[in-house]
Image: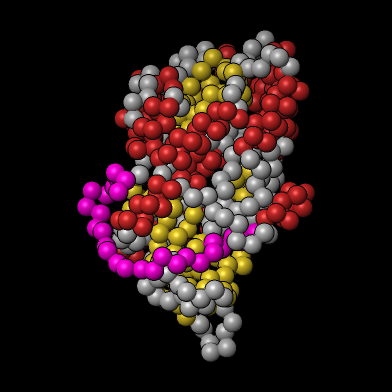
Amino acid sequence: MTKIAAASANAPRQRRSRADTTQPVNAPAVSGPAVNSQVRAQLAPQAQVANDPAPRPEGALRFLSEAQPATPCLVVDLGVVARKYAELQAALPRAEIFYAVKANPAPEILGRLAAAGSSFDTASAGEIRAVFASGARPERVSFGNTIKKPADIAWAYGEGVRLFAFDAIEELRKIAAHAPGAEVYCRILVEAEGALWPLNRKFGCVPDMAVELLTEAQALGLKPAGVSFHVGSQQQDPTQWNRAIAAAGSVFRRCADAGVRLSMIDLGGGFPADYAAGIAGIGAYGAAIAAAMNAQFGDAWPRLIIEPGRYMVADAGIIEAEVLLVSRKSAGDDRRWVYLDIGRFGGLAETEGEAIRYRVEALGTVAKATGPVILAGPTCDSADILYDKADYRLPLDLKAGDRVRLYSTGAYTTTYSAVNFNGFDPLRAYFV
Ligand SMILES: Cc1ncc(COP(=O)(O)O)c(C=O)c1O
């Protein structure tokens, strides 16, 4: 059996027999509420191909069938993480990878990426500590949250971190006061059309303000490094970087006119996981970004940073869960309710608005025929419904005690898992 590391040292194991038969993977359409019509038109024909094969992290699958761990649990295949890192590097060879720690901060993942040469985008002092513990030096850390406590800025600076994000004058003054002489970059507001998990409204300022703030940064004794943006998470349209890079180019030129020489663009995250068919390969993202950079900067590209989170870890993870109850609300109800031992509060928070639609596979059932279901979690909270509007179908003989797998769940799951809500433990994780 593959050597494993369990996040919880005392994680109990349950042995149970089950048939090897698996049902086809439920692959709902990729289009979510935030997908614009252009992207939908491009992607829908492929996205609706039924039962598209899920990405198969072989090490994680082997562990699940051999160890049969207690559910719910996440198994992350570190080999897939390493492969994703290499594929992203090949697709964007001129970019430095700063892994967005928030996607999954497990020491096993940070250690693997640090050894591969990754740098790290961090959101808090806690994430910076986790990155240091993985062996990475402060030069490889960016404090990328635009909302920071002065004490955390001072602590990070004292530890040697020299790269800080901001999007407002108050934040800039905090950095000037507590991280004198540091490099700073300004996050700009960009569109997030085509993203299933948009991140645009809360962060960033308009390019006009960015020019003013970067000029002010220089006056405050800081080093104005450049511009960042995020085109939205699970961005399905590689051309969405075009406009954002053009906006960054315009900030570069206007700052130069004001005597401020910028040297860096941070393209953010947004690179997609393989939740459903129809997503372009990472090579298409690399090509679209390179074309946009050439259009703005010709041969003289500035330093380029990317902050992938979801892309790096989502497809490496599989959650295995147990069916607790299959019921109908009335005898004639044509949809069954399927309650799992994991829900919104157990790590599947990104099912909010049914935005992220994981592939779900039932194990051990024999029926070939499937029927429509509403999938829900185990807590006594009526918000704990995973999929109602999305057309999920599961085998007609599915029953309490059967197990299901949710694929591509390595990102934004363990860290969203509530601590003891309704008395349930946080999501247990294994790394193989
Ligand atoms: C500043 C920043 N960078 C990178 C990321 C990672 O984004 P993604 O998971 O889409 O790659 C996020 C996600 O919230 C973010 O806030």
Question: Compared to 38, does 13 lie above or below?
Answer: below
The reply to whether residue 150 is visible in this rendering is no
In what quadrant of the picture does the C terminus appear? top left
Q: Is residue 58 left or right of residue 234?
A: left
Q: Is residue 132 left or right of residue 367?
A: left
Q: Percent position (x, y) of residue 351? A: 53, 58
Q: Give the extent of the magenta segment.
A: 1-29
Q: Nearer the viewer, residue 142 or 7?
A: 7
> Does 65 lie within the magenta span?
no
> Does 23 lie within the magenta span?
yes
Mark count: 0
The reply to whether residue 91 is visible in this rendering is yes
Question: Compared to 260, does 76 lie above or below?
Answer: below
Q: Nearer the viewer, residue 431 or 154?
A: 431
Q: Percent position (x, y) of residue 306? A: 56, 29
Question: Compared to 387, does 331 lie above or below?
Answer: below
Identified at 64% across, 62% down, the residue is 50
Q: Residue furthest bottom?
A: 331
Question: Compared to 308, does 208 lie above or below?
Answer: above
Identified at 57% across, 48% down, the residue is 274
Main SS category, magenta section: loop
Q: Is residue 242 left or right of residue 130?
A: right
Q: Percent position (x, y) of residue 144? A: 50, 31
Identified at 42% across, 39% down, the residue is 79
Q: Nearer the viewer, residue 122 or 29?
A: 29
Identified at 46% across, 41% down, the residue is 80
Q: Percent position (x, y) of residue 355? A: 59, 56
Q: Nearer the viewer, residue 346 or 181?
A: 346
